[in-house]
Amino acid sequence: MTAATRVLVLNSGSSSLKYQLIDMAGPVPGARRPARGVVERIGEPGSGVADHAAALRTVGEELAAAGHGLDSPGLLAVGHRAVHGGTRFTGPTLVDNGVLAEMEKLVPLAPLHNPANIAGIRVARDLRPDLPQVAVFDTAFHATLPEHAWRYALDPAVADAHAIRRYGFHGTSHAYVSRAAAELLGRDPAGPGGFNVIVLHLGNGASASAVAGGRCVETSMGMTPLEGLVMGTRSGDLDPAVIFHLAREAGMATDAIDTLLNKRSGLVGLCGDNDMREIGRRIAEGDERARLAFDVYVHRIRKYVGAYTAVLGRVDALAFTAGVGENSAAVRAAALRGLEGLGVELDPVRNALRGSGPRVVSTPGSAVAVAVVPTDEELEIATQTRDLVGERGLSLPPPQ
């Protein structure tokens, strides 16, 4: 009988379904990925993929064509990316009807994401009702925030009645990168003496976290992913009174302001581009709008690094990840410029070298190590899924 060692990781978006089949066997779990892909334009006219059920059937066909069908005995479980777990889901969760009902209640907190996540889970359960389905929530890693970090300075009765608090997002990435940074530096993330790291997830969406001894104690995104760092199309931190001003003086409706702050702000709002490579090209040609957008972007990062250094008290490492964090030496150099007083010394030669794996880009004498750690959210989901299935005794494969 074939041992079940593979986890199918599904990321169901509103119009796409990404998947990876990850083998968790062997000395390096996740090293083998027999299949991966994406089904796009779900529900769009002319796409031929009417809904998530049709999309998952397409995934099944693609897996079968590669010899790894959904009926494969080697499949241990399905791990699902889920965006918002509220205060109810603070770790990987085995999905049943009650869990789905609770996720439905959280839709108002993530109206663009949770419905698609739920749809993907329902379809996968229908296709393989015998297989454990595990939801891994983006918010879960931030559930360890102390109340003074997650509570906003609002009337608690109003805030609690409407679930207004800091939840944080990108948690699967922050969990993986904080642990991988410790491993890169030969440290135990939760060992004696602790390991304190600031993780900078810089993609089109961007967030920072302060992690002490493997536990998140502060993060930049709030009730929604709008708060915090400057992003590709999101404003990040903003005086709330700007919203009132736009409503009163510009006559803008709530939905128009929402669109402005989430889709027409950040880098694209400042200079018309949200691709850091294009912004860099424009800066080299003397484009002042691109230069200003870059300066605003890195200033906000530097400000958060300073703030989180104060929160942690001692920082062992800074870890850059995601598309911009992993690939833009210019962003890393500019964001950390002037932080020598905090023990940060970037090595310009190491920083300029491109690489695909985890690497240290600070000087040997830097008190705070600076690392580039490619994120792997799919592996993190697969790992949490396998670990949970093992804890529950659900067909965990024998040791390899």
Image (cartoon, rainbow, N blue to C red):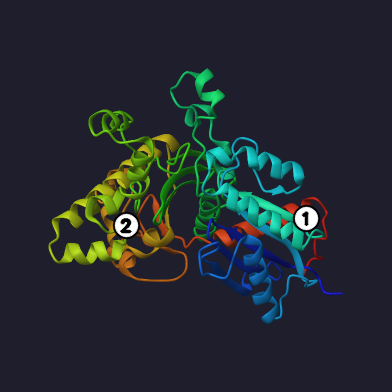
- Quarter holding the C terminus? bottom right
Q: Amino acid at mark 2?
A: Arg
Using a 10 Å C-alpha cutoff, classify the residue at mark 2 as few (fewer than 14 neighbours), some (14 to 19) or many (20 or more): many
Secondary structure beneath label 2: helix
User: Residue 121: horizontal and vertical position, in percent?
Assistant: 68, 55
Q: Which residue is mark 2?
A: 332
Q: Which residue is mark 1?
A: 390
Q: Are marks 1 and 2 in contact (CB under 8 Å)?
A: no
- Indicate whether 198 appears above or below 45: above
Secondary structure beneath label 1: helix
- Residue 115 lies left or right of residue 309; in this view the side is right
- Residue 296 lies left or right of residue 194; in this view the side is left
Residue drawn at point x = 80 percent, y = 65 percent: 397
- Indicate whether 261 appears above or below 164: below
Residue farthest toward the right in the current orientation of the protein: 1
- Residue 85 lies left or right of residue 275; in this view the side is right
User: Residue 321: horizontal and vertical position, in percent?
Assistant: 43, 58
Specify the quadrant of the image occupied by residue 242: top left
Specify the quadrant of the image occupied by residue 294: bottom left
- How far, Cα to Cα, is label 1 from label 2? 39 Å
Q: Is residue 336 at all visible to an observer of this figure?
A: no
